[in-house]
Image (tube, grey):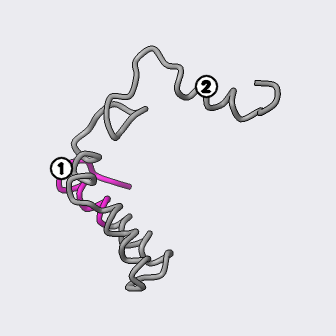
């Protein structure tokens, strides 16, 4: 661990009593995150950049709005 200082941070992140429990980890599982994964929001965002349909900044803005919409459709209002 002394040779690589980041290993302590990684060990702390993965050395947990309750292991990975879903895409929302380390937060509790929730329908909003499940909806984001089911709709392929992140994958579409990357695809938009790779194909040249959007700049990285525009793809992030688009994905963020889609995520907000999914959360709010599920009754989880966003600020």
- Per the model, the C-alpha gap separating discs 1 and 2 is 34 Å
Query: Circle 2 is placed at which residue position?
Result: 11
- Above or below residue 48? Residue 63 is above
| Cβ atoms at labels 1 and 2 below 8 Å apart | no
Q: Quadrant of residue 21?
A: top left
Q: How many marks?
A: 2
The furthest residue to the top: 17
Residue 47 vs residue 27, the one in the foreground: 47
Image mark for residue 6:
none
**Residue found at x 44% / y 69%:** 60
70 drawn magenta: yes
At x 26%, y 38%, the residue is 30
Q: Position of residue 49 (x, y in %)?
A: 43, 77
Figure check: 24 above or below 21: below
Residue behind mark 1: 74
Judging from the image, what secondary structure is the residue with disc 2 in?
helix
Judging depth in this view, the residue of 48 and 29 nearest the camera is 48
Q: In the image, what residue occupies the spot 55% across and 29% down?
A: 13
Left/right placement of residue 55 relative to residue 27 reads: right
The front one of 73 and 21 is: 21
Q: In the image, is residue 10 above or below residue 72?
A: above
Residue 45: x and y in percent read 37, 69
* Image quadrant in which the N terminus is located: top right
Position of residue 24 measured from the top left corner of the image (x, y, whole percent)? 35, 39
Q: Picture coordinates of residue 20 (x, y %)?
A: 38, 28
Find the magenta span and give its range.
66-79
Left or right: 48 as drawn, with respect to 11: left
Q: Nearer the viewer, residue 3 or 41?
A: 3
Drawn side of residue 9 relative to residue 51, left or right: right
Q: Residues within 10 Å of mark 1 (few under 14, many from 20)?
A: few
């Amino acid at each position: 661990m002394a040779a690589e200082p980041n290993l302590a941070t990684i060990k702390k992140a993965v050395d947990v009593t309750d292991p990975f429990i879903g895409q929302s980890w380390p937060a509790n599982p929730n329908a909003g995150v499940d909806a984001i994964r089911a709709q392929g929001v992140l994958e579409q965002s990357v695809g938009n950049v790779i194909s040249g349909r959007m700049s990285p900044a525009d793809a992030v803005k688009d994905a963020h709005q889609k995520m907000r919409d999914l959360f709010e459709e599920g009754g989880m209002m966003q600020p």
